[in-house]
Image (cartoon, rainbow, N blue to C red):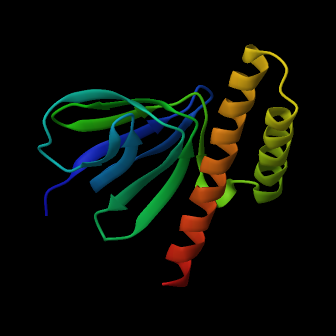
Amino acid sequence: MSTIRCDIVSAEEEIFHGTVTMVVATGEMGELGIAPRHAPLITRLKPGQVRVILENGDEQFFYVSGGILEVQPQVVTVLADTAIRAKDLDEAAASKAKAEAEKLLANRTDSMEIAEAQAQLAQAVAQLQALERLRKNLKH
């Protein structure tokens, strides 16, 4: 089976480093599936889930706040401001952040606050979606 190295790095630390058969992430134009021998590529990532499929077929899930995905012949690199293993996400904190962002949007005042609230809402929703996908995969 063909493999490629994958590195997922946040501003604080390396979150994942290993050999995988596939990396799935959400780019600006939609979902990307990166397999070995993929064409070189650089794209921005939306806040959301990154899924890696290991050599043994197991999957690992990560939340990224956005960032850059770079594909080179031997390595896929995900560079994110924030990257967290999905199992380490705090559902209560994400739900609270979502509620606060929705409240800010409901009581909108100026365009800067609206843009900030929309960004916070997108990140909170992406975290909750990553948790939900993790739960679904653990049930199977």
Pinpoint residue 4: horizontal percent, then vertical percent. Answer: 23, 47
The residue at 63%/28% (across/down) is: 12
Pinpoint residue 50: horizontal percent, then vertical percent. Answer: 45, 49
Q: How many marks?
A: 0
Residue 42 falls left or right of residue 3: right
The residue at 83%/47% (across/down) is: 99
Task: State whether residue 29 is above or below residue 126.
Answer: above
In the picture, the quarter occupied by the N terminus is bottom left
Between 136 and 9, the residue placed more toward the observer is 136
Q: Quadrant of residue 10?
A: top right
Residue 36 falls left or right of residue 126: left
Pinpoint residue 133: horizontal percent, then vertical percent. Answer: 54, 66
The residue at 56%/67% (across/down) is: 134
Pinpoint residue 137: horizontal percent, then vertical percent. Answer: 50, 74
Task: State whether residue 112 is above or below residue 135.
Answer: above
Residue lying farthest to the bottom in this orientation: 140
Task: State whether residue 57 is above or below residue 95.
Answer: below
The residue at 66%/31% (across/down) is: 119
Between 28 and 85, the residue placed more toward the observer is 28
Residue 37 falls left or right of residue 121: left
